[in-house]
Image (cartoon, rainbow, N blue to C red):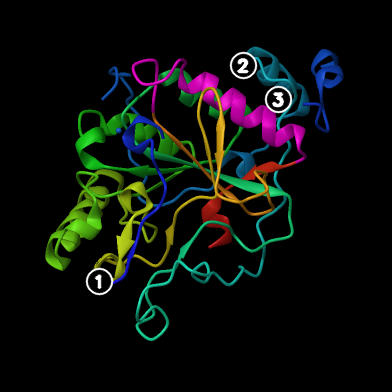
Amino acid sequence: MRVVVQNDKKGLKAGMAGLLAAAALMSGCAGPDTGSTARPAAGQQPHKAAAAPDSHAALVAAARRWGLDAVPLRPPAPPKVKPRITARDGFEVDGQVEDDLPPVFTTIPTRQKVVFLTIDDGWNKDPRFLRMMNDLRIPYTAFLSNYLVKDDYGFFRTMQAEGHTLNNHTLTHPYLPGLSYEEQKDEICGMQAIMKKQFGKAPTVFRPPYGNYNGDTLRAAKSCGIKYAPIWDEEVFVDHWEYREWDRGLHPGDIVLTHFRGKDDWDGTMIDDMRRFLNKVTREGYAVARLEDYL
């Protein structure tokens, strides 16, 4: 049986001079209880950036308030015809095509200068992170593990109500290839059931912990209603980036990983992490788009 192992050596410890730079600014895997009270959404809501764009002046003020080098670029409208998603070369398992298994991929096929922000596990629950991303209208996808989010589902309901997508990252974040098919199915389907109960919808997108999987993983995921299994092309930390590709750069459609982490694990906060992420992508002319708009 083929096992695909990713080089996520950080594991759970991990993980601008753009279009409107400083001149524009001048112009005008358990964290603290946030006390969030937002009600769960029954289904996926459009991201607020698409539903009710803020004025440029408000975004300039938000960029200044959160210490960014430039105002983040706005993403283009979602494609009317969704790109065809297939497994990345070398990331297939036996029976990938024949059994129509969920593809594992690191990049969305697009020529648009967009990247996709994904955040794993749910450990740190910083209400300032929610405010920052809402102020800046930055979409992101959260991949949740139940053992880290069950102490405060409300935090993630607030996230969902603000238009961000919640997806499956298993119940307990195990090394899935080390489990039997039935054990893997319990991890994935069990999280599907919790997400439907707590957030109103079972997702169709799943990320295997550590990016590690085998054929049983994808067959179990399919049986649980999963259609896609994205991993990542880059990972951002508070103090550095890590890259999958030899050129150590961003590319159109790249999926970027980070984690819900804070000072207990990093020399900084989620705010510092997002500042590093946004400064780089903006400086290089990329906008942050919503992953699910391309699936």
Mark 3 or mark 1, earlier in chain: 3
Q: Quadrant of the N terminus?
A: bottom left
Mark 2 Cα-neighbour bin, 10 Å: few <14, some 14–19, many ≥20: some
Identity of the residue drawn at 39% across and 30% down: 260
Q: Amino acid at mark 3?
A: Leu
Circle 2 sits in a helix, a strand or a loop, which is it?
loop
Mark 2 or mark 1, earlier in chain: 2
Residue 179, x across and y down, in percent: 16, 59
**Where is residue 47, by image quadrant?**
top right
Give 78 or 167, whichever is nearer the viewer: 167
Q: Does the segment drawn in magenta span residue 270? A: yes
Mark 2 or mark 3, earlier in chain: 3
Circle 1 sits in a helix, a strand or a loop, which is it?
helix
Give 128 or 154, whichever is nearer the viewer: 128
Q: Which numbered marker is on residue 223?
A: 1
Mark closer to the observer (3, 1): 1
Residue 200, x across and y down, in percent: 30, 50
Q: Which residue is mark 3?
A: 59
Q: Which residue is mark 2?
A: 66
